[in-house]
Amino acid sequence: MTGQRSAEAPAEDPAGPEGLPSDDLSRLAELHGVATSYQPSADRTVTASAAALTLALAALDVDASTPGAVAAARAARERELRERLLPPTTVCWGGTEPDALATLPSGTRLRIETEQGETRTAVAQLPPGVHRLTATTPDGRTATSHLVVAPPRLRTPAGRSYGLLVQLYSLLSRRSWGMGDLGDLAELAAWAGRALGAGFVQVNPLHAAVPGAPTDPSPYRPSSRRFPDPVHLRVEGVPEFAYVEDRERVRALLERAGRLRAAVLEKGELIDRDAVWEAKREALELLREVPLGPGRRAAYVDFLAREGQALEDHATWCALAEVHGSDWPRWPAGLRDPRSPETARARGELMDRVDFHCRLAWLTDGQLAEAQRVAREAGMPVGIVHDLAVGVHPGGADAWAQQEYFAAGMSVGAPPDAFNARGQDWGLPPWRPDRLAESGYEPYRRLLRALFRYAGALRIDHVMGLFRLWWVPQGQPPTEGTYVRYDAEAMLAILVLEASRAGAVVIGEDLGTVEPGVRETLRSRGVLGTSVLWFERDWDGDGRPLSPDSWRADCLATVTTHDLPPTAARLTGDHVELRDGLGLLTRPLEQERAEAAADTGEWLELLSRLGLLRGTHGGQCTSEEEAEIQAVHRFLLRTPARMVGVWLPDGVGDRRPQNLPGTWDQYPNWRLPIADAEGKAVTLEELAGSARVRALVEVLRAGSGAGS
């Protein structure tokens, strides 16, 4: 069994003065991809503590608890690398011979078993895929490696497109059950594509959440990234719904759904995800009583076969969580191991519940695919842009089913920097780079393949995590962490391979501190970046707003994001008042107001100088606020950005951010519907009929070249 292991301080730290690592420990860490220092700013380098290195190495099963253990581990690692013929995973870009093969002894024979079932003896003209490479030297030594053959780069989107950004749960229609669902997504895509000429709709992660009381509403801390959350299902969209015999219960459920919807849209209440799921779960249990027709049954069986062990594990976790709670490390000992006899026995006893959760995954997968089909049929060149969270909840399904791939006792976060002196701990267990490489990145491949089935594009949250992640030992502050490196070439090759197979676009969220060379590497492989207007300044010069011609082309350009104030709030300074009311300001209110006003003023001055502020004349706008919101979007269209996104709540003057970083119970993160400037919820139907939305869209449509 591969259980969770808590991070404990070493019995004897192999440390130098003030807890700094010894030379031997530093060298051992470097040999395993554990960084010995980091740079919070260009002019400052911080050395990682001996404790941080020791604990990170322990999570990689390397004993560095004493000087003797460090010396032995270092010698073993150096010998392993010296004698190794091939790395566990080798990358071949577009037929170019990998560097790893150039170091093999002369006369080495190659045998390549391809994904397609062929056997080759050379890497030239290999089909894309993850193949099995065997090298045999003249003296009889043999080594095997996973050989990733990927196109040199992804295709870039043809021309320029604009699209809408929205948190799906916040988009309620007159048919929603208290939160936005996949039926609403399909309706939004059809309207935006056909009536507005939009090229894409970007949504939040729709990964399966960890059930609880209450459920964590954050879409960025899911139970599973591999499988979607059935809370997003449009229940009436399931074919079997029409054939439920107990129509009285159906009427009662629809009335209940109406009350949930009215609570948000008419009474101003927050989105209650748990209440929505309780109603939908009851309805979905009722649907199970309707037999599947022969065609539907065959489709379900195909889905079960395609998803295999991964789906069985996910559904088993869901069934066990109904009995033992959603934090698997607290389950009875035998059930903590997905491969134990106790788990097999429990799966058999709960087979009806396992099948229920398999059925939910199938239904949700189908509605996700339908939303993308509708988007493409509406003329969208991209369609639905899905979001891949950076990690998973430590007590959730993925962490249970894939324990061997996660670093026990570690959590992902961020080091201290100019914006957060304490650093950050996101509470997400990191993948082990060594285990990923040994498997040919199998869990990563399967994850991407599943998402690309219904995504026209994929946004990678914290895309810098393909290169390195900040590991924080459990029980320690984020300041006591260190970076651990991943094989970025292999991670990128898998990403490019799976995206190219799906014909999809990839967008990397590369905001914040990014180490040198990362953006350039991503761009060279066709991965777009993310540029947010308020952050685009000449940081190497006078710090003033960056002129539009100085922006990069290979990016998705937006004015704001779900973690930032809506544009109206920033323009009016309402975001400062919000933070002050919650006690989040670290400086006097007047100083914060003045700085925010100066920041906004610089942008407005640039917009005016460029002739983008056109006022309220000519019927284009009804207020100065609208004129300014339109102006910042005209600015985005002056940049060379290939994709331009508009935060849908900006279309109606919404003031409230969907997420306010640094808060938990002080602010209703992830529970707000789209609302107008007065805070009144706005439905999808009202958005479609809004003159203000239409005026903003016309600005984008004209500048992006979208057809009539």
Image (cartoon, rainbow, N blue to C red):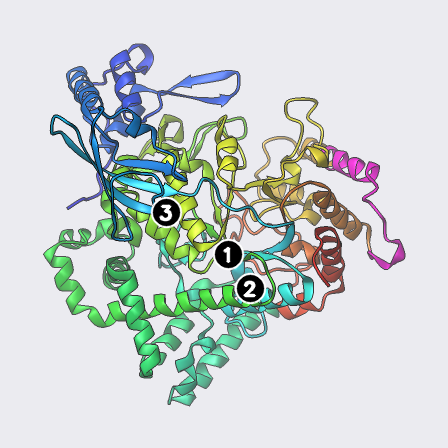
Circle nearer the N terminus (3, 1): 3
Q: In the rendered structure, does residue 203 fall within the stretch colored magenta?
A: no
The one nearer the camera, 208 or 118, is 118
Residue 535: x and y in percent read 63, 35
Residue 108: x and y in percent read 20, 29
Q: Which residue is mark 3?
A: 128
Helix, strand or loop under label 1: loop
Residue type indicated by callout 2: Arg
Residue density around tag 1, few if under 14, some if 14–19, many if 20 or more, within 10 Å: many
State whether residue 370 is above or below residue 644: below
* Disc number lying in front (2 or 3): 3
**Left or right relative to 302: residue 419:** right
Q: Is residue 275 visible to the viewer in this orientation of the structure? A: no
> How many numbered discs?
3
Q: Is residue 60 visible to the viewer in this orientation of the structure? A: yes
Residue range in magenta is 598-622
**Left or right relative to 578: residue 296:** left
> Do callouts 2 and 1 mark residues in contact (Cβ within 8 Å)?
yes
Distance from label 3 to label 1 (Cα)? 20 Å
Helix, strand or loop under label 2: helix
Q: Which residue is mark 2?
A: 376
Disc ID at residue 651: none
State whether residue 8 is above or below residue 280: above
Residue 199: x and y in percent read 61, 57
Which secondary structure type mostly characterizes the magenta part of the structure? Answer: helix
Q: Which quadrant would the C terminus be assigned to in this image?
A: bottom right
Q: Which residue is mark 1?
A: 456
The one nearer the camera, 535 or 595, is 535
The one nearer the camera, 18 or 364, is 364
Circle nearer the N terminus (2, 1): 2
Residue type indicated by callout 1: Gly
* Disc number lying in front (3 or 1): 3
